[in-house]
Amino acid sequence: MPFDDDSHQSVEKWIGLFEDVANMFTLSDLHKLVFGKRSLKGKAKLSIQSETSVNSWEKLKDLLLSEFGYSCNSAELHEMLRKRKLKDNESLEKYFLKMKQLCNRGNVEDTTLMQYVINGILASVIRKSISYGC
């Protein structure tokens, strides 16, 4: 399970999932460090490679959190959800999962998520019908 900050994945969630798997396999801190570093992609990988003192899982985790930890308030989160619309080349499933991923950045109720998803789909349908002159 790679971590790439370009995918808008929450580093906090990734660390939680990574630690759950590591605990299932009772990995040592050294193994966590090795597998953690090998799981990084993109800017996260480059960022860690540029650091010289990352020699424990705790240091790696702290560095990832300080570098890629994302915090937004609920107003910013709701604004992102309101602006996110179904793209022309995007499947409904992918759109829904991306919206759900955004909701994981905060505390958004399922009914609120569904309303944003429906609004994003309706906006896409209206946009298409206008462009086709319907």
Image: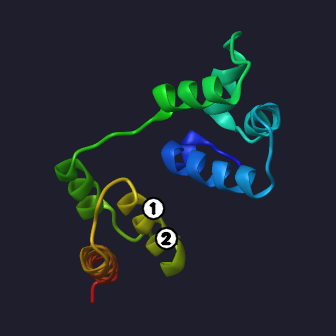
Q: Which residue is mark 1?
A: 101
Farthest residue, direction left: 75
Which residue is found at the position 49% from the left and 45% from the top? 12
Residue 26, above or below 65: below
What kind of residue is marked 2? Leu
Q: Secondary structure at mark 2?
A: helix
Quarter in which the C terminus is drawn:
bottom left
Which residue is found at the position 28% from the left and 84% from the top? 133
- Counting from the top left corner in percent of width and height, residue 30 is at 81, 31
Between 56 and 93, the one lying in front of the other is 56
Residue 67 visible at all:
yes
- The scheme the figure's colours follow is rainbow
Farthest residue, direction top: 52
> Do the CB atoms of the residues marked 1 and 2 lie less than 8 Å apart?
yes
Say whether residue 42 is left or right of residue 77. right
- The tally of labels here is 2
Q: Secondary structure at mark 1?
A: helix
- Counting from the top left corner in percent of width and height, residue 82 is at 23, 63
Q: Which residue is mark 2?
A: 97
Q: In the picture, residue 33 is in which quadrant? A: top right
Residue 38, above or below 99: above
Q: In the picture, residue 53 is in which quadrant? A: top right
Say whether residue 119 is left or right of residue 51. left
Mark 1 closeness class: few <14, some 14–19, many ≥20 residues within 10 Å: some
Could you give the CA–CA distance between mark 1 and mark 2, rounded to whole angstroms? 6 Å
Which residue is found at the position 82% from the left and 37% from the top? 31
